Image (spheres, rainbow, N blue to C red):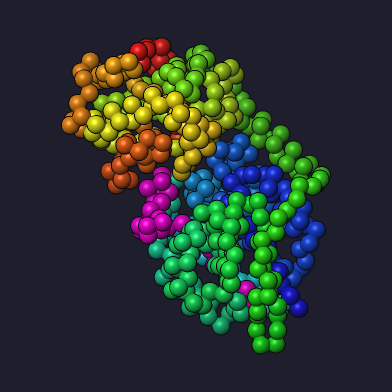
Amino acid sequence: MNVVIYHTNDFHSNFNNLKQVHAYIRANKTEHDLYLDSGDYTDLSSIVVQADGGKSAMKLMIDSQIDAMSLGNNEIDLGKEAIVALTKSGVPLLSANIRDLDHKMIDGIYSSIIMTKADKRFLIIGLSPYYSKDFEHASYDTFFMMGGVTTKEPIALVKQELEKQKGQYDYAILLSHSGLFVDKVMLEQLPEIDLCLGGHTHDIATSKGYSQSGQGEKLGKITLEITETGIVQIENIQLDLVEQQNERFDTLYKEIETTTDQILSQPLPHIRALAFDAFNESELINFICDALMKEKPSDLAIMHTGIAERALTNPVSRKSLIENFPSKLNPTHYQISGKAIREAILLSFDEAHIRNSGKGPGFRGSVLGTLGFSRNVEVMKNTGRITIDGHPLEDDKIYSIMTDDYLQRGSGYPSLRVEDSEAIFEPGFIRDLVEKYLMDEEVFASSKVQRLF
């Protein structure tokens, strides 16, 4: 007899990809098979996810006959309370290495489960991201802790779980949202793992005992033969799923979309509309920079115009804010030299550069854009003269700036990069900051003040 393990990872709320997986699984999965996911089925840019913390999106996974999933960073970004709410769905959520801020297990999250198929016991262990690509420890905790979650070193915990379950299973599966390179290093220390199903780095990778399937555009299929002497992997492939009609999924999604749209479409009070231009100074980016300065007074605020997709127009709702500011980027405070600021500003004049895609961690926009500044900054494009509070920018002086973690990482504007340890990350995203200041007369008035000449 054979057992087939189907596997996905990193849908990031791409429900069209999930629709194809849903159709295939429902048509082909048998009672002897498993469907497992390695995390990041959600994305905070999604209206459906934002409306109720991922509960409606989970209904789509349940109807896709999911058996278990590990928690990715995008699930953890929902926050502890939302994660606990997701555990009520009935889908086993796995992570051996996440804890609350008291370093205790989070209610409803399991380190592992054992599922029996074809009279064989499959131990399934989950892991959430801990190491950076450079193997920095607890590299995600700065952001996770904002939502009440922290992480522990995973290798020791997997070994502990294997020892705890010793004699209780026939085959060990690791659902690891750690990334391809990290998985390879960890697995060298975990020879007891028979199969690792990875995620996080969006690779399409297939080898003996390993599978990672991109961003949901592939469906991993691992076939195991159950023999008298044990369990043998006889096939490990990635399936390309063709688009097809799927009325069941469409009906369910339409119901969910209607409900979540009603939740998020309630009008928010605001003073007026704000104009936007991704490649020139605009009221909307001026507004964001001035709100950042009011939130945490600094020498200046800087923002990439690619943070927004369009103007702030009537009506304003949580839905329109999510659509306009899809990136999950936090207000960020740090210190940097005047020379680094000058280099970034000069680069923002490069018409070819500002039209780049802007791709980078946490970014969900469509273009990099130019730079905007707080009202105390004046930039003369023709001469390159830059002043802050009326004083010339000094290359050797250290300035405190408010921006977001996109620019702090050097995305798009490399000179603005500093290490995470040198930055202070504030709770909430830029869109939350916009919502907070929608009725602030002072910030709306200052957004009209010109900064680029």
Q: Hey, which quadrant is residue 379 in on the image?
A: top left
Q: Residue at x 35, y 38 (%)?
A: 414
Image location (x, y in percent) of residue 192: 51, 77
Q: Quadrant of the N terminus?
A: bottom right
Q: Is residue 120 above or below residue 414?
A: below
Query: What segment is highlighted magenta in the picture?
Result: 121-146
Image location (x, y in percent) of residue 180: 50, 60
Q: Nearer the viewer, residue 308 or 316?
A: 308
Q: How many marks?
A: 0
Q: Hey, which quadrant is residue 62 in on the image?
A: bottom right
Answer whether residue 118 is magenta in the image. no
Q: Residue at x 63, y 32 (%)?
A: 263
Q: Is residue 339 above or below residue 22?
A: above
Does 218 sit left or right of 434 as displayed? right
Q: Residue at x 41, y 51 (%)?
A: 140
- Residue 94 appears in the figure: no
Image location (x, y in percent) of residue 131: 41, 58
Q: Nearer the viewer, residue 351 or 290?
A: 351
Does 194 sit left or right of 228 as displayed? left
- Residue 403 appears in the figure: yes
